[in-house]
Image (cartoon, rainbow, N blue to C red):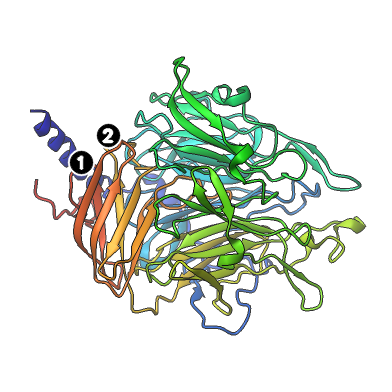
Amino acid sequence: MHHLVLNRKIWFSIIGLLLLSACEKGPWREQCVKLDQPDPLVSTSALTLGSGEQLFDDGTAALAFHHVHNLIGVDDYYESIAGGGVAIEDFDGDGDLDIIVTGGTSGVGYFLNEGDEGFVECASPAGLDRGSDWTLGVSAADYDNDGDRDILLLNDGKNRLLNNQGDGSFLDVTSIADLGGNERSAAASWADLDRDGYLDVLISNLAEHFQFFPSPELEGDRSKLYRNNGDGTFSDMSSTLPAGDLPIGSSYISPLLDFDGDKNVDLLLTQEFGMVVQRNQIYQNLGPSTDGTWISWANRSETAGLRHPEAAMGAAIFDLNSDTLPEIFLTNLLENAGSTETLYFQSQPFIFEDQSGTYGVNGLVSSEESGLYRTSSWAALNFDYNNDSYDDLYTVYGHHQDGDEMWRQCPTFIAVCENQPNALYQNANNQAFTQLSGTGSEDHGMGRGAAAADINGDGCLDIVSVNVNEPSRLLLNRCTYPNHSAKFELEGTASNRDAVGTVLIAKTADNVHQTKYITAGSTSVHSSQPFGVHIGTGTADTIETLTVHWPSGTTETLENIPTAKNGSARYIIVEGSNTYYPYAPPVSGQAETNIEP
């Protein structure tokens, strides 16, 4: 009987997922607008550096995606630095990926994907226009397990939790959830820390005040850890951590990952001012506490070897040695000759070693002679741009705003030197990375956040790069490689609905193993990556085995999954089904399905 009930639950989940993707468009959609032309008074940044093969085209204008994260008129040095994020997800359930971009002191941009027609902007009618909010970042997650992705807007001041009403419109539930706070929040990372099936959240908070000149002066703040109570509310559980709280500091991002493979999600609290107040901190999740307060944590920072980088702002997650444990790349600020971006491997659980030199991933440079400056790196993305089975690296650079003071001039203070181009690194068989040039992805804007996703459904990953005070860019992958890929949407039943914390291991005929981690808000900066898992397979037209390690502890192995060159290989995997189902694109008013229970 229990087996029968479980099967019914799985089938209802599958049918519900497909029906959700065919929701009728609400009347608010009629108020969305198509932004046909960018503001002619707003300049756009250059997109190319060097003379290599062009891999990306600028789709910003053609697809009517126009938005600026505005900090014009913000004179305070520290306040003028932070902010600029993006979330990519299918928020309205029509099968296409939509985009939310922060606006700083201006409004958030909400762009619904209309397929070949491009985007329409819907922030105000959909409930994302929050008036006077100063929004720095955005994070997406299905916190209530109802099958659609909700939004947490990270603000300078009170945050906003917006509940997706099932059609891509949102309702402000911040007061009910008790998740507002009143800090300067940069990011939110979600994971089911206690394995109760609901996503808990760590909100990374920046310092209240920082003064660089005439001498460094910092008023730090504490990031906050919240438990999801499962009833739409959250409880601040920061006091359960060692020392009774998270340390005072300033954190742009705090990845929640299972670093030691014990199925308990651990916590990495990065620090922006590691040279001043606090180095990066890492906490091991030991499982339920013996006193019943919630979770038992152990601070492994003293011996972890994660002191550097001292100004971490973005993270990218890899498995380069195929041991299924995550390697982590952290961005940085070029402060002195020893400052580098850092790629960490674990020699043993919670013992990290810097392999940046071996893998060639440090792009920080300051050259007054050549005029090339990459002195402040922000977002970092791991994504397989050419579908060759190996995750590549994209690093976003962006200068700090200059000022009238002498110390805020280039080259005296290299952080404010303009036109810092983003960098794309190609992964060579997980042995090293090569920085490419002339790819069309070298955005020279004041970059901050970024996300990668297959926006146009051609089977190749595109890039959205967020700039401050000038338009963000949608860079479309030319997809000229003869390689295959597949995309998987996972739904937890015993696990959280988003399947956050799932580890997937794909094996193809050429004996290449790939590890993919489903995270929520734990990478890039101020930003949120889509939950769908994109797997490039090179010339292999089949994934021989796909092993899925669910957060609940269940493991399923699926075999002989077809891939494609054109993006048509899309699948749904529901926990407990022991199989995969073809994704059926929605039809107006009803769902198509190839599933016959």
For the N terminus, the image quarter is top left
The residue carrying pointer 2 sits among few (fewer than 14), some (14 to 19) or many (20 or more) residues within 10 Å by Cα, namely some
Measured in 3D between alpha carbons, the distance from the residue under mark 1 to the one under mark 2, in whole angstroms, is 8 Å
Q: Residue at x 44, y 16 (%)?
A: 292
Is residue 449 shown to the viewer in this render? no
For the C terminus, the image quarter is top left
- At label 2, which amino acid type do we have? Ala
Give residue 407's quadrant in the image.
bottom right
Is residue 541 shown to the viewer in this render? yes
Q: Name the residue tied to disc 2.
A: 494
Residue 585 coordinates in the image, percent (x, y): 24, 58
Residue 44 coordinates in the image, percent (x, y): 64, 69
Marks 1,2: beta carbons within 8 A = yes
Residue 379 coordinates in the image, percent (x, y): 59, 56
Q: Residue at x 48, y 60 (%)?
A: 382
Horizontal placement of 367 versus 23: left or right? right
| Residue nearest the observer in this picture, 539 or 52 | 539
| Residue nearest the observer in this picture, 392 or 112 | 392
- Against 524, residue 229 (above or below) is above
Secondary structure of the residue carrying numbered label 2: loop
- At label 1, which amino acid type do we have? Gly
**The disc label shown at residue 138, or none:** none
Q: Earlier in the sequence, mark 1 or mark 2?
A: 2
Residue 590 coordinates in the image, percent (x, y): 20, 50
Horizontal placement of 177 versus 490: left or right? right
Q: Residue at x 44, y 39 (%)?
A: 170
Q: Residue at x 49, y 25 (%)?
A: 296
Horizontal placement of 270 versus 125: left or right? right
The residue carrying pointer 1 sits among few (fewer than 14), some (14 to 19) or many (20 or more) residues within 10 Å by Cα, namely some
Give residue 459's quadrant in the image.
bottom left
**The disc label shown at residue 576, or none:** 1
Give residue 534's quadrant in the image.
bottom left
